[in-house]
Image: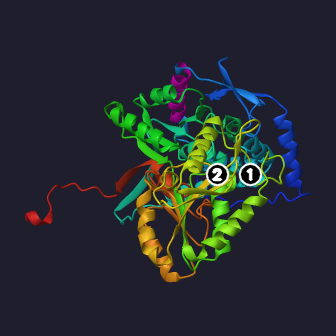
């Protein structure tokens, strides 16, 4: 055991590198990209500190060049998931009792590895696997993941410092135990940082984890796991399995030792998992913690006093960065009539300047959507919009999957505020705009609140402070992250805790201490120094 009240290094957000032409970081990531895109790798599962192969494999290809194979990964059988659970439970015996500063040191080391020797590699992997531009990859797989690791350590120590009051005759202590049993992390394709954070934040608090990454993110997930291994995460603490999500999930949720789900993904899948947990509730040794961040139908509202150029930039960045494949991406916008013509001109002008193609070419603002299923879904919505009389395609509207899954950034204008693409999550580079009359601002706010089942992010742009006040109040329940005079994306760890309510999730705020508190089971300890020896209280008299 450590002897001392240790102070961890002060956590600060990792600076975002520029990758400007001629910069060393640009050269380093291009070199890593070229090496990795031209090399075929084999990705095993990782169970109890060992690489596990099955011979039953699937290929991995970049979304922007889907005929090119960069590797294979191995699919789990039920026995492998059972092994992952068993070895996690065995590892817990030691890991749960490991001093907090030793756990902290591991993940602080992981952060430094990503900030230094692994930076180019993890960014290049994210560019290849998820078709992110270098700017989007740098923000995600480098900076945000580093921030999660460093700042979560800071939050962990803050939590441990939070203790109840004591008196001279009794000492009250809170012990923040890890959950009894094992936890399950299910991570999405779109953020390497989320993939790294969901299992690591639970492990940091002393839990053991079975981790199932998205099939579309395994290439970069391997780099994350390589970092964790080099940082010293003990065998069995984080176990990685790939394959049939139904089989893996059913095996995990059928275990009586299952104690927590950390999920980011689709709303439908999360609700199905919740249902399965509920149906199994009598089998569990404890009530499992359920944390989920799911879908969004994120909005921009522009008041008549908003700056049209600012509105246009919020639309373009908010809707089209990373091809709109962010749960926070702007997907519907409500623009006041008097500024619409200017906003439209700026958006159309920006659209004409977009360059689209491989992320290796750093002049490209835009690359491919994640896979053919996403491409086909988005193409169907665009075709339908072209056929509908109450919708106009004012920018984009084209698509091509011959080489990569490219959907042109598309702006739809509708006269129907309840049109399909104003309500349903598309998860791609399509935004639908509704123009409202200047004197119907209050009614439009009601419309925004009542149109979608989601409540993740949203933004109000205005110069009129009274309009901002009104919007902030009227929209208080339809966005867990609300932005004033900014786009509805770009939450920074430690600055804007992230999460939404309604069908967008449990709002447990990743990037804050609130999330970490979900992965502990506090034990209250009261120690009495002079123990009573007589049952009688003064009110009893003699």
Q: Nearer the viewer, residue 44 or 387?
A: 387
| Residue 34 location, quadrant | top right
Say if the magenta span includes residue 476: no
Mark 2 burial class by Cα count in 10 Å: few <14, some 14-19, many 20+: many
Answer whether labels 1 and 2 touch (C-beta < 8 Å).
Answer: yes
Residue under pointer 2: 429
Which element type, helix, strand or loop, lies under badge 1? Answer: loop
In this view of the protein, which residue sits in the foreground, 72 or 350? 350
Name the residue at the right extreme. Answer: 22
Identify the residue at image location x=49%, y=51%.
420
In which quadrant of the rendered image does the C terminus lie?
bottom left
Q: Which mark is residue 104?
A: none
Residue 375 at x, y percent in the picture? 64, 40
Q: Label 2's element? A: loop
Q: With 14 as the anchor, is 198 left or right in this view? A: left
Q: Is residue 427 visible?
A: no
Q: CA distance from mark 1 to mark 2?
A: 10 Å
| Residue underneath mark 1 | 366
Report the predominant secondary structure element of the magenta stretch: helix
Question: Left or right of 497: which side holds 538?
Answer: left
């Amino acid at each position: 055991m450590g002897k001392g009240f240790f102070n961890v290094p002060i956590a600060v957000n990792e600076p975002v590198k520029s990758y400007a032409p001629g910069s060393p970081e640009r050269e380093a990531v291009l070199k890593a990209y070229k090496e990795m895109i031209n090399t075929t790798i084999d990705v095993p599962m990782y169970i109890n500190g060992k690489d596990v192969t099955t011979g039953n494999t699937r290929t991995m290809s970049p979304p922007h060049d889907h005929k090119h194979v960069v590797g294979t990964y191995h699919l789990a059988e039920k026995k492998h998931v059972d092994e992952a659970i068993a070895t996690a439970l065995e590892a817990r015996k030691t890991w749960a009792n490991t001093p907090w500063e030793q756990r902290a040191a591991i993940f602080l080391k992981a952060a430094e590895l990503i900030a230094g020797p692994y930076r180019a590699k993890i960014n290049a992997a994210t560019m290849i696997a998820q078709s992110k531009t270098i700017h989007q990859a740098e923000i995600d797989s480098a900076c945000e993941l580093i921030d999660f690791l460093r700042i979560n350590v800071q939050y962990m120590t803050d939590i441990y410092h939070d203790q109840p009051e004591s008196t001279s005759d009794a000492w009250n202590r809170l012990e923040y135990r890890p959950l009894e049993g094992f936890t399950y992390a299910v991570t999405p394709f779109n953020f390497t940082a989320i993939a790294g954070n969901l299992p690591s934040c639970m492990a940091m608090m002393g839990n053991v984890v079975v981790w199932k990454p998205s099939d579309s993110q395994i290439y970069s997930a391997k780099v994350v796991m390589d970092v964790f291994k080099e940082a010293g995460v003990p065998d069995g603490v984080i176990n990685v399995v790939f394959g049939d999500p139904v089989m893996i999930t059913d095996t995990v949720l059928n275990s009586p030792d299952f104690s927590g789900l950390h999920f980011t993904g689709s709303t439908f899948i999360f609700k199905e998992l919740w249902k399965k947990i509920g149906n199994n509730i009598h089998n569990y040794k404890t009530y499992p913690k359920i944390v989920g961040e799911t879908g969004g139908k994120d909005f921009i509202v522009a008041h008549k006093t908003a700056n049209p150029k600012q509105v246009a930039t919020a639309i373009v960045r908010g809707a089209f960065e990373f091809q709109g494949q962010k749960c926070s991406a702007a997907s519907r916008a409500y623009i006041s009539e008097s500024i619409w013509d200017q906003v439209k001109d700026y958006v159309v002008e920006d659209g004409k300047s977009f360059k689209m193609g491989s992320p290796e070419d750093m002049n490209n603002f835009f690359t491919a959507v994640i896979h053919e299923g996403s491409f086909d879904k988005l193409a169907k919505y665009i075709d339908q919009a072209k056929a509908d009389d109450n919708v106009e395609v004012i920018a984009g509207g084209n698509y091509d999957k011959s080489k990569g899954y490219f959907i042109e950034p598309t702006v739809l204008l509708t006269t129907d505020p309840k049109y399909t693409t104003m309500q349903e999550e598309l998860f791609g580079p399509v935004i639908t705009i509704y123009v409202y009359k200047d004197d119907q601002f209050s009614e439009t706010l009601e419309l925004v609140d009542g149109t979608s089942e989601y409540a993740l992010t949203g933004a109000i742009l205005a110069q009129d402070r009274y309009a901002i006040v009104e919007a902030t109040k009227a929209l208080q329940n339809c966005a867990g992250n609300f932005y004033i005079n900014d786009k509805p994306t770009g939450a920074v760890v430690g600055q804007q805790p992230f999460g939404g309510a309604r069908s967008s999730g449990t709002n447990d705020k990743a990037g804050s201490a609130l999330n970490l508190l979900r992965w502990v089971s506090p034990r209250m300890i009261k120690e009495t120094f002079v123990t009573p020896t007589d049952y009688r209280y003064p009110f009893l008299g003699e």
